[in-house]
Image (cartoon, rainbow, N blue to C red):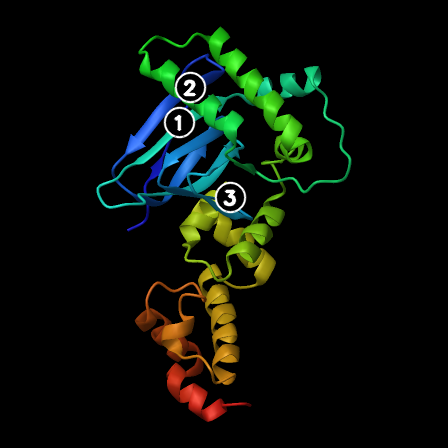
Amino acid sequence: MLPREKHLPTLQNTKRKSNIIRYNSDIATINSRIKLEQNLFSFLLEGNKSVQYAGTKITISPNQFFLLSAGNCLMSEKIATPGGQYRSILFFFDNDLLTDFFIRHPLPMKSKHKDEPFLVFEKDPFLTNFVDSLGLILASGQSLSQELQSVKLEELLIYISGCYPEALKGLHYYNYNSDKDFLIRQAITANIYSVITVEELAFLCYMTLSTFKRHFAKLYGTSPKKWFLEKRMQKAAQMLRKGNLNSSEIYLELGYENVSSFIQSFKQVYGTTPKQYQLNNLNV
């Protein structure tokens, strides 16, 4: 079953430009389709989290935090211990607030930094105390004024800009309106051997499934399913010819969730099982 598309509790239906919430869950999720309407600081307190954009994927643990740019992404949340929870504090804010921050606090670019849709930073004493202060504010049950949220966002951005100035600016300039062909190529290059569906790739590229398939065929001259199958089996054959690995040791690396599906795909392309192919082509 494909993961359902969902919206994190952003501010798309209000006029507020920022919001701080506590987000807890006792249910793990895998590749939930998320439409982030705003930028997001995700302060992980318990569990593990991974986020995937069109061209890149990153995973964090409780000793790290995310700053995510608005846009489409696949998000997975895992519970670390039996009986535990996934716990985090989320700080949403509009891109206008980030732009305003850079106007008032210009950051010099010492070298060209690759624009990325996220920034990962390590927890340190300042950030630990900062997140604790957010937790205390939320625990009070009082309504958070926009003035207070603005002060907390300013405090956080000033600190982050001092530690990661070029990366922060690179995230700000990340362009989600990139050329469709570029987005497809970026997504395909990053996910040739990933466990990902064509529907999920289309979502990451801001396209319907039919539009994605049409653009893909224009670029690669075939369907996504056939292209991925051929590329993965080409690598599988190359690995098998080396002779030191078998099907059960390589199927995960090739983007398959179980060995039987991998064997079936291999037979579809080469007309024989991986084991027989390996015996016939050892050291060829």
For this view, does 62 lie left or right of residue 110?
Answer: left
Mark 3 vs 1, N-terminal side: 3
Q: Quadrant of residue 154?
A: top right
Mark 3 vs 2, N-terminal side: 3
In the image, residue 268 sits, relative to residue 272, either above or below, namely above
Query: Badge 3, how many Cα within 10 Å: few under 14, some, many 20+?
Result: many
Residue 9 image offset from top left, x and y in percent: 37, 25
Which type of secondary structure does the marked residue at label 1 adopt? Answer: strand
For this view, does 151 lie left or right of residue 108?
Answer: left
Query: Badge 2, how many Cα within 10 Å: few under 14, some, many 20+?
Result: some
Instruction: Identify the residue at image location x=64%, y=20%.
Output: 99
Residue behind mark 3: 53
Instruction: Identify the residue at image location x=46%, y=12%.
Output: 15
In the image, residue 256 sits, relative to residue 284, either above or below, namely above
Instruction: Identify the residue at image location x=50%, y=34%.
Output: 123
* Amino acid marked by disc 2: Leu
- Residues at badges 2 and 1 in contact (C-beta under 8 Å)? yes
